[in-house]
Image (tube, coloured by chain):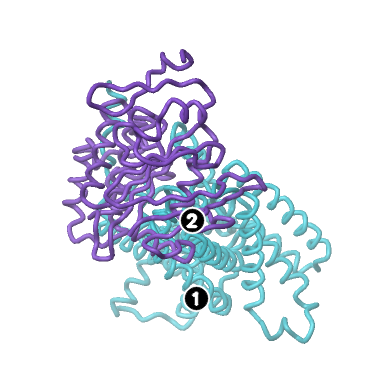
Chain colours: A cyan, B purple
Amino acid sequence: MTASTLSFAPPRRLPPRRATWLLLALLVAVSALSLGTGAAGLPPTRLLAALAGHAPLTATEWLLLSEIRLPRLVTGLATGAALAVAGALMQGLFRNPLADPGIIGVSAGAGLGAVLAIVLGGLLPFGLAATAGPHLVPVAAFLGGLATTLLLARVAASGGRTSVATLLLAGIALAALAGAATGVLTFLADDRQLRDLTFWSMGSLAGAGWARIAAALPLILPAILLSPLLGRALNALTLGEAQATHMGIPVERVKRLAILATAAAVGAATAIGGGIGFVGVVVPHLLRLATGPDHRRLLPHAALLGGTLLVAADMAARTVAAPAELPIGIVTATIGAPVFLWILLRRRGLEGL
Amino acid sequence: MTIEAHNLTLARDGRTILAGLDFTAAPGQITVLIGPNGSGKTTLLSALAGDLRPQSGRITLGGTDIAGLSAPALAARRAVLAQETQVAFPFTVAEVLRLGIETRSHPSGAALMSRLLAEVDLHGMADRPYHALSGGERQRVQLARVLAQVHPAVTPQGPLWLMLDEPVSSLDIGHQLLVMDRARRFAAAGGGVIAVLHDLNLTAMVADQVLLLADGALLAKGRPAGVMTDARMSQAYRWPIRMNRAPDSGPFLLPQMAGAA
């Protein structure tokens, strides 16, 4: 009888407001730690002393902080938040907790767009590449992600239902296709482009700079800030598209908006961070366990926890093999893939899989 | 404020599913759709709910063609209980119910929630995870959700409509009667009920109007006693059927008697 008593127990959940404060506190703490971590000597204690006014930073230290560590922190926060929110959006849209932009091929599509821009951007007519400047790669990644998401939604959905098996298989096919195209492009790339591509494909925040951030934020910020507005609609979609329509949700419009926001967030995140996987599946899952599946809280919380986790992963990537640096994609996959398997084990017997 | 079908014809994949249906469903009444498998009952209910557009003819709600109404406008006038509803994420009973309550700005959502749960015999289950419930319990949670969407049964804009697709399919006899009693009370409060039922005895018991469908055509409509005759039922279900009559009650059917005519 113990088992049935357990399964009928009301889910233990954190009160949403307390969860928000906890996540904010965690974000601030991890960010502060991250600013004080790195190959060059600028320990957290040194930062604290400077903040307290005991010993002002030297010019070199200030440069290190403002041009290397701060942009890297902001890139980590933005990328992690974008990927986690995109994951939560896709899961709501496809009604499945395993829909991750990395797993179903959206990241691969965005990556292909970015690689196209890196390798062939110079061939664009009318000096478009020069005009677009740092915006070219994020926009190309966004378009790649958008095309992939639209294709996925088309392939996997039939008669108002999304087949998860079809979704995952279509994702595999799309990722393979994008990977092949990316492979062809690496043959065309010159040495400098090749180094960019290799490092970038494994995911890294090492190239973080204010110019890249400025190019990506116009895509990431609207997606993150506006996604909670889709919360109620995504909650209703949990019961199915027909049921959501019956409750007055304009389902087609909601789907278009969710796809657009996902593509923007994943495209921009891929453009500045490269191939970083599993953030989108791990973060929403942890939050659902902690505070429940209500998308109105899940989406903003995912932004907070996603940013925090990626910054923490970046710290790990910088320190594990110091002074060398691991690609951050390796760190997130090492943590994320087991969590993904754990979800699969736990969800056996639940619907929607 | 009736729902009317005018020469309703609906085809899917080139196959005609509903052919030239004409009928009126009135608020304050329970209208039940019956007919053999594949006769078009669920399709008709989907059309009445506004999910499917007819090829020709039209459906009006209080004189307005529902084809011109948006999803929110329709949601403010009717709620639909599907045959089966799967919930993709680990929502609790209360969270599923809240989806229905939030479709209208109810001043006292919490009070309404506990009242609705009691009405579907799920008192005290608000915090249970939905996926841990039995099939019958889930069906009743969904019923409570759609009841929240059409509460109260009559608004200043007119009566509201409850559309139920096989609402008792996975329920025991006690809960079948409970659900039909709830539908009856909704109609008594001034709302309109349109339900697809497979159980002919239940239909005979609760229906104010029966629409008998066969092969997409409306074979008969009217009060159960007039529609559910031996001849019509045998024709619709393609099997000799003998209706019987219990003392002081409507017609009933004994499956043991089917084929004995």
Looking at the image, residue B254 sits to the left or right of residue B36; the answer is: left
Disc 1 + disc 2, Cβ < 8 Å: no
Residue closest to the eye, A313 or B143: B143
Circle 1: element type: helix
Q: Amino acid at mark 1?
A: Leu
Instruction: Determine the residue positioned at 49% across, 25% down.
Output: B234
The answer to whether residue A287 is left or right of residue B190 is: right
**How many residues crowd mark 2 within 10 Å: few (<14), some (14–19), many (20+)?**
some
User: Which residue is outermost to the right?
Assistant: A188
Q: Is residue A225 above or below residue A199?
A: below
- Please provide percent x and percent y for residue A230: 42, 63
The residue drawn where x is 42% and y is 55% is B4
Query: In the rendering, at what x and y percent does residue A101 appear?
Result: 57, 55
Which chain does tag 1 point to? A
Rendered view: B19 above or below A308: above
Assign the N terminus of chain B to one quadrant of the image: bottom left
Residue matched to label 1: A64
Of the pair B245 and A250, the residue shown nearer to us: B245
Reply above or below: B51 against A142. above
